[in-house]
Image: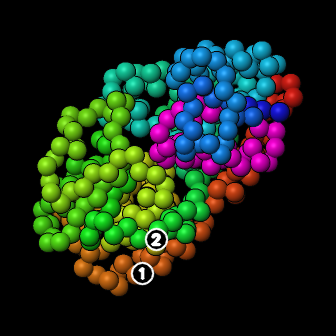
Amino acid sequence: MNYIINSRFCTQAMTGVQRYAYELSLRLAKLGGALPVSPRNTQERPYADLNPARIGYLKGHPWEQIELPAYLWRSGSPPLVNLANTAPLTYGNQIVTIHDLAFIRNPHWFSKKFAAYYNFLIPRIAWRSKSIVTVSEFSKREIVTLIGIPSSKVHVIYNGVSEIFKSGGEDGVEKHFGNYILAVASFDPRKNLRGLMEAFLKLNFKDLNLVIAGRSSKNFNMDEDYSRQGRERIIFLTDIDQNELARLYRGAIALCYPSFYEGFGLPPLEAMSSGCPVVASDIESVKEVCGNAALYINPNDTESIMKGLRDVVEDEDLRLSLIETGKKRSCLYNWDDSAEKLYQVIHRSGFGLKNGGG
């Protein structure tokens, strides 16, 4: 064992951040020298393949801020790799991954407690860490601009596409929801689901549903419960696994991703790999990921969202073009390549892989 992977993410539901941490951790473990370590309340599914060592008795942030650094100090202060935004504040021999700075840009999107904690914690661990990893050039510029971290300290390592989205899932195409537009997003204000629902309902397409796959969280500052909209053509799905999600992509007319702010935007990439046309926000990070393979909309303009949906529903040639360019674009993103880049960052980050200091 040369370094530790902070695997607290294995106690959480798998959304984009956890997917990134899980896929890279699996590959780092195979490359050798890595020991994933997590709290005892690690979920058996979907993290069983990682099989982290379970230590301590606390959970959540107390485990990460108290028991994890104590374990590291007892173990000779080995390097620590953090892949899911947070890290021990008092431990310096580490790399931290910061996915985005939405909590600085728009703290009102989050609960007051969450925004206050992240605004306190993230800048401090960023400055204290040996290196910072992030998921896009956009997020790198945010980190440099908003926290003041030197550009040379920040390394961009993109998300990849899991094999299941290339194969489409075990059962092929989702057929339970008729013709549908798909949205894959947590019930988070920055995901702009309210704007999407408003645009969809105004279009009043007959025999077309809107399927929203996501989950709520106490970390988000929600002023209404999306699941209580009472719209018969809007279907809410929660706690779906990767096979179900792959089938949803393959069965959809298109994915609509109308976010106000993202560090990367994994669902459009998964959709493109699955052969699903993508309608997405014309924000900087999403355009960096999708290139010319998406139909772009203004997330702040209901009419723009409506036009994007109308165009992709009514124009079969447009859909076929988006599918073709999307599949080509998705081939640029590979978890194995990303893991190799991270492995190189770990070995160039200025700490000894045998005798690092805490």
Tell me the residue that label 2 is attached to. 172
Point out the stretch of residues depicted in magenta.
Answer: 6-34
Direction from residue 170 to residue 37 in the image, left or right: right
Q: Quadrant of the C terminus?
A: top right
The residue drawn where x is 81% and y is 43% is 32
Q: Is residue 33 magenta?
A: yes
Q: Position of residue 332 (x, y in %)?
A: 60, 66
- The answer, for residue 9, to whether it is visible in the render is no
Callout 2: SS: loop
| Category of crowding for the residue at label 1, using alpha-carbon neighbours closer than 10 angstroms: few (below 14), some (14–19), many (at least 20) | few
**Which image quadrant is residue 276 in?**
bottom left
* Residue annotated with mark 1: 321
| Residue found 75% across the figure and 43% down from its top | 29
**Residue 16 is a magenta residue:** yes
Residue in the image at 49% along x and 55% along y: 242
Residue type marked 2: Gly
Quadrant in which residue 301 is drawn: bottom left
Measuring from the top left, give residue 274's x and y in whole percent.
48, 69
Q: Residue, x 52% and y 23% (percent of image)?
A: 60
Q: Count residues near mark 2 (Cα–Cα under 10 Å), then give few for <14, some for 14-19, many for 20+.
A: some
Residue 218 placed where, x, y %?
Answer: 34, 30
Q: For this rendering, which residue is in front, 235 or 348?
A: 235
Q: Amino acid at mark 1?
A: Ser
Secondary structure at badge 1 equals: helix
As rendered, which of 6 and 262 lies closer to the eye? 6
- Residues 137 and 25: in front is 25
Residue 117, compared with residue 319, is above or below; it is above
Q: List the single residue furthest toward the right.
A: 354
